[in-house]
Image (spheres, coloured by chain):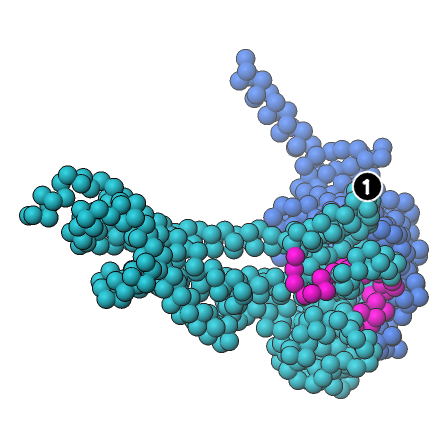
């Protein structure tokens, strides 16, 4: 009797799994919503530290995961600081010091302005379908929205070796994300909220990042404005732009 | 009687030479070991107190929990007020503020772009006040290799090896890229005034020494301090007094429910130093105990052999009416004389060896290249008043114990048998 029950459970679970769609297809549709050739956005980062909360505003121009340029607008102490990312190199410019400083590749994984975001998190717009394999492992509901739970595994050496994504079944947008290191340790959690439809795509206007290795209540990343696939002047992605 | 015994010992070297040499050797080793341990322990205490722990140290509770990460966002606020309270409450202790920081030190080229850079482990102290105690506490004059000490705001000292790695020289401009107390990015330009070598690998790697007011400005730490260190004004660490001060302070100022309340730690309660010092004392005790035991066994045997050799002499002394207790007493007094002579000789040789190690030292820098321990690269012995008498305790004790054990045979001699033994 027990053998029959085990076989029945295995058959049911295999049948349930067979009903799941292909993970790669979902990931491609999600990339269609979340990524673009270029993005220009103004954002507000509310960093809930252990002792205080502060807000940093910036304007960014990004082209895929290769090129990005950011200028900080507020608060006064950060105003005028600029960052340029070309592939795995990052340059910083501070008007107070009037210096351009190059940061090496591993620093891209460090926190930006004490937030829960790394430079990579902030400056890159990666197409996950080109970097990870995907498998649907479950179906769950988040905030009354039915979601596919996707297990992503990196196909090359990346800061996050695997990811777990909760993707809205209807809109193909991620509602929650968990980022893991190569050891399988959970590194970050992201909740994506306040979705709006812009240029025919769904996009979150508020993302709550939590670096689980860091004290504090996380960082809210709020998109104040965003434009997709707008032309970005080439000179912006040069070191000369930093001192302008 | 002592004169009589002395004459006996001098005229019969077989009775005294070997025991004196044994005792001298043991005492010499004890004296040398004591001075070496004193030097090593004293050096660790001094290096840690000077660079890291103070004789007592105050941090916020949250900072103390994560101090390895140098969490300046959890630093002590209203440091001036706290310093004033400490000064009036504990006048025998000198209080100073410090800020530790980390970041990248970047050396620009002609166009102001990165030429070289390296990770910096920084310490911000009062470098510019006319009578700053930090100059002496960190031994900066002696540690200066090139250039000079900072004379004005915006000047820093960097480790000589670090300067070599960056190919930087006194007078060069550098930029410190770090994180402010509130998590912002901080870029601040400095000029290298000089290079230093502390002789402590853990400090010399990537060392940057800046004035605390400059770093407060750079890291947005107005009236904040990562750590407040206290030093006894006589310059020596007093463990019991430090622990008493820490207990009293914590009872009065430290609220266990407040993450940012100040907490004081005595040097012995930081970084396992207390255990380390205890371990040093424990080793010294074990060394002395083993020495006493080994010497006693050797001298017991020497006494037994001497007893056999002097079998006839002692028998004759007993036969002509000398009291057994008197004979036993004379053996003990002889042992005391031998012990004292051996201890004096051993102490003299041990002190000479310790003095050599105190002056010249042994360079162990190559073994400490990646060490995070605050320990000088040169191990030296340290001669203290105790070094002068520490050898006498095992030196005298072991000879007396050896003689006392071997001399027990005197009481076993039967008076009735003595004449028969003497006839044969």
Q: Which residues are magenta?
A: B211-238
Residue in the foreground of this view, choosing between B278 and B218: B278
**Residue at 63 percent of width and 45 percent of height:** A184
Is there any visible trace of residue B261 in the rendered image? yes
Is residue B401 left or right of B248 when viewed as pictured?
left
**Residue at 69 percent of width and 53 percent of height:** B241
Question: Magenta includes B217?
Answer: yes
Q: How many marks?
A: 1
Please rate how many residues cluster around mark 1, counting C-alpha atoms within 10 Å: few if below 14, some from 14 to 19, many from 20. Answer: few
Residue B131 lies, in percent from the top left, at 79, 75
Is there any visible trace of residue B158 in the rendered image? no
Question: Magenta includes A109?
Answer: no
Image quarter hosting the N terminus of chain B: bottom left
Which residue is the site of mark 1? B257
Is residue B330 left or right of B358 when viewed as pictured?
left
**Residue at 89 percent of width and 70 percent of height:** A80
Single out the residue that lies furthest toward the top: A1
Single out the residue that lies furthest toward the front: B321
Residue B169 lies, in percent from the top left, at 68, 84
State which chain is coloured blue.
Answer: A
Relative to residue B223, is residue A215 depicted above or below?
above
Give the quarter of the image for residue B150: bottom right
Is residue B247 left or right of B276 when viewed as pictured?
right
Residue in the foreground of this view, choosing between A12 and A58: A58
Secondary structure at badge 1 equals loop
State which chain is coloured cyan.
Answer: B
**Residue at 78 percent of width and 37 percent of height:** A147
Residue B112 lies, in percent from the top left, at 78, 82
Query: Pointer 1 indicates a residue of which chain?
Result: B
Residue B333 lies, in percent from the top left, at 34, 55
Relative to residue A139, is residue B164 depicted above or below?
below
């Amino acid at each position: 009797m027990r053998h029959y029950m085990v076989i029945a459970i295995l058959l049911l679970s295999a049948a349930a799994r067979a009903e799941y769609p292909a993970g790669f297809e979902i990931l491609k549709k999600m990339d269609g919503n979340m990524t673009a050739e270029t993005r220009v956005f103004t954002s507000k980062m509310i960093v809930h530290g252990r002792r205080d909360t502060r807000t940093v505003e910036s304007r960014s121009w990004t082209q895929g995961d290769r090129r990005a340029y950011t200028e900080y607008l507020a608060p006064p102490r950060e105003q005028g600081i600029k960052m340029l990312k070309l592939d795995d190199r990052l340059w910083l410019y501070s008007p107070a010091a009037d210096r351009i400083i190059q940061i090496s590749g591993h620093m891209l994984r460090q926190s930006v302005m004490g937030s829960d975001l790394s430079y990579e998190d902030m400056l890159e717009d990666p197409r996950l379908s080109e970097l990870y394999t995907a498998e649907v492992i479950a179906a769950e509901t988040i905030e009354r929205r039915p979601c596919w739970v996707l297990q992503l595994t990196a196909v090359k050496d990346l800061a996050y070796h695997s990811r777990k994504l909760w993707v809205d079944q209807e809109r193909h947008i991620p509602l929650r994300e968990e980022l893991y290191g190569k050891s399988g340790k959970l590194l970050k959690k992201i909740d994506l909220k306040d979705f709006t439809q812009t240029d025919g795509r769904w996009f979150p206007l508020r993302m709550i990042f939590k670096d689980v290795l860091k004290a504090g209540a996380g960082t809210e990343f709020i998109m104040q404005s965003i434009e997709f696939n707008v032309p970005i002047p080439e000179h912006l992605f040069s070191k000369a732009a930093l001192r302008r | 009687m002592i004169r009589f015994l002395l004459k006996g010992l001098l005229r019969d070297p077989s009775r005294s030479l070997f025991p004196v040499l044994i005792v001298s050797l043991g005492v010499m080793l004890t004296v040398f070991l004591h001075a070496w341990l004193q030097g090593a322990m004293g050096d660790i205490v001094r290096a840690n107190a000077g660079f890291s722990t103070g004789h007592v140290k105050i941090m916020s509770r949250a900072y103390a929990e994560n101090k390895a990460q140098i969490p300046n966002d959890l630093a002590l606020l209203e440091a001036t007020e706290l310093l004033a309270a400490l000064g009036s409450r504990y006048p025998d202790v000198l209080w100073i503020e410090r800020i530790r920081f980390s970041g990248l030190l970047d050396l620009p080229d002609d166009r102001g772009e990165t030429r070289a850079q390296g990770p910096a482990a920084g310490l911000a102290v009062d470098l510019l006040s006319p009578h700053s105690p930090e100059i002496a506490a960190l031994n900066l004059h002696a540690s200066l290799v090139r250039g000079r000490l900072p004379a004005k705001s915006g000047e820093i000292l960097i480790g000589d090896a670090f300067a070599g790695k960056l190919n930087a020289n006194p007078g060069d401009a550098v930029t410190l890229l770090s994180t402010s107390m509130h998590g912002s990015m901080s870029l601040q330009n400095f000029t290298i005034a000089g290079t230093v070598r502390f002789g402590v690998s853990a400090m010399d790697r990537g060392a940057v020494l800046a004035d605390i007011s400059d770093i407060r400005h750079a890291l947005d730490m107005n009236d904040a301090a990562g750590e407040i260190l206290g030093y006894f004004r006589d310059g020596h660490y007093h463990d019991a007094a430090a622990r008493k001060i820490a207990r009293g302070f914590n009872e009065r100022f430290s609220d266990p429910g407040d993450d940012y309340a100040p907490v004081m730690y005595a040097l012995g309660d930081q970084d396992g130093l207390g255990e380390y010092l205890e371990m040093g004392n424990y080793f010294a005790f074990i060394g002395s105990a083993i020495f006493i035991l080994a010497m006693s066994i050797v001298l017991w045997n020497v006494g037994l052999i001497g007893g056999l050799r002097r079998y006839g002499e002692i028998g004759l002394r007993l036969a002509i009416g000398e009291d057994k207790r008197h004979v036993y007493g004379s053996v003990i007094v002889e042992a005391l004389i031998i012990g004292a002579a051996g201890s004096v000789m051993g102490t003299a040789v041990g002190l000479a060896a310790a003095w050599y190690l105190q002056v010249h030292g042994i360079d162990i820098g190559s073994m400490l290249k990646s060490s995070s321990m605050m320990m000088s690269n040169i191990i030296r012995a340290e001669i203290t008043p105790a070094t002068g008498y520490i050898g006498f305790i095992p030196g005298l004790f072991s000879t007396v114990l050896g003689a006392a054990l071997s001399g027990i045979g005197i009481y076993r001699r039967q008076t009735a048998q003595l004449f028969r033994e003497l006839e044969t």
